[in-house]
Image (spheres, grey):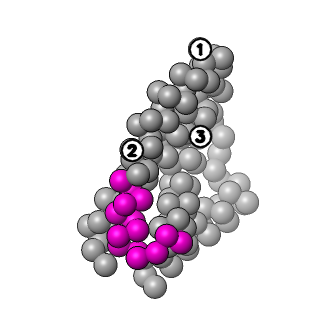
Amino acid sequence: MNVKHVAISAGLFFIGNIIIWYQANSQFVWPWWKDRSVLAVLGFGVPASFFYYYGWTFAVREFDTLWSARLFAYALSYSAFPIMTYFYLDESPFKTKTIICIFLSLIIVAVQILL
């Protein structure tokens, strides 16, 4: 396994997750976005899709299965969401159920990389 390609994949997924966070949640942070769903979908969705596409390409190449790439991408979605949600909406990720879910996501990433 090429660690550099795994890191590139993780970075692309991380950036894609940040963009998608803005797509889904800008309406709750800035009133201007509330009634602009088409603009949010096109403006954020198209760039995010490129990050996911290339992140997916690297992940499948390195993990050799779609399932491993999918679980890797899913688990990495927890890397950006808590940070963005805390920063913009002051919702703490330090609640028992959230900490458990983040921990389980880290285990998923570790299983995909180490096994």
Position of 79 with respect to 11 (left or right) is right
Q: Is residue 70 left or right of residue 13?
A: right
Q: Along the line of sight, which residue is nearer the eye, 34 or 50?
A: 50
Query: In the rendered structure, which amino acid carries the disc numbered 1?
Result: Trp
The disc at residue 50 is: 2
Count of numbered circles in the view:
3
Residue at (65% x, 53% y) in the render: 94
Q: Earlier in the sequence, mark 3 or mark 2?
A: 2
Picture layout, residue 66 above or below residue 91:
below
Q: Residues within 10 Å of mark 2 (few under 14, many from 20)?
A: some
Mark 1 lies on a secondary structure that is helix
Q: Judge whether 94 appears above or below 44 on screen.
A: below
State which region is magenta: 54-67
Which of the two labelled residues, at mark 1 and mark 2, occupies the earlier sequence position?
Answer: 1
Query: Which residue carries the number 1 mark?
Result: 32
Residue 96 location, quadrant:
bottom right
- Give residue 32's position: percent from left, percent from top: 59, 14
**The N terminus lies in which quarter of the figure?**
bottom left
Amino acid type at image mark 2 = Phe
**Of the residues tagged 3 and 1, which is closer to the observer?**
1
Q: Amino acid at mark 3?
A: Thr
Q: Marks 3 and 1, how far apart in space?
A: 18 Å
- Give the quarter of the image for residue 58: bottom left
Instruction: Name the residue beneath numbered marker 3.
Output: 85
Give the spatial CA distance, label 3 vs label 2. 23 Å
Residue 42, position as x, y percentages in the image: 50, 28
Contact (Cβ within 8 Å) of mark 1 with mark 2? no
Q: CA distance from mark 1 to mark 2?
A: 26 Å
The answer to whether residue 46 shows anywhere in this view is yes
Q: Could you tell me which residue is drawn at 55 percent across and 60 percent down?
A: 74
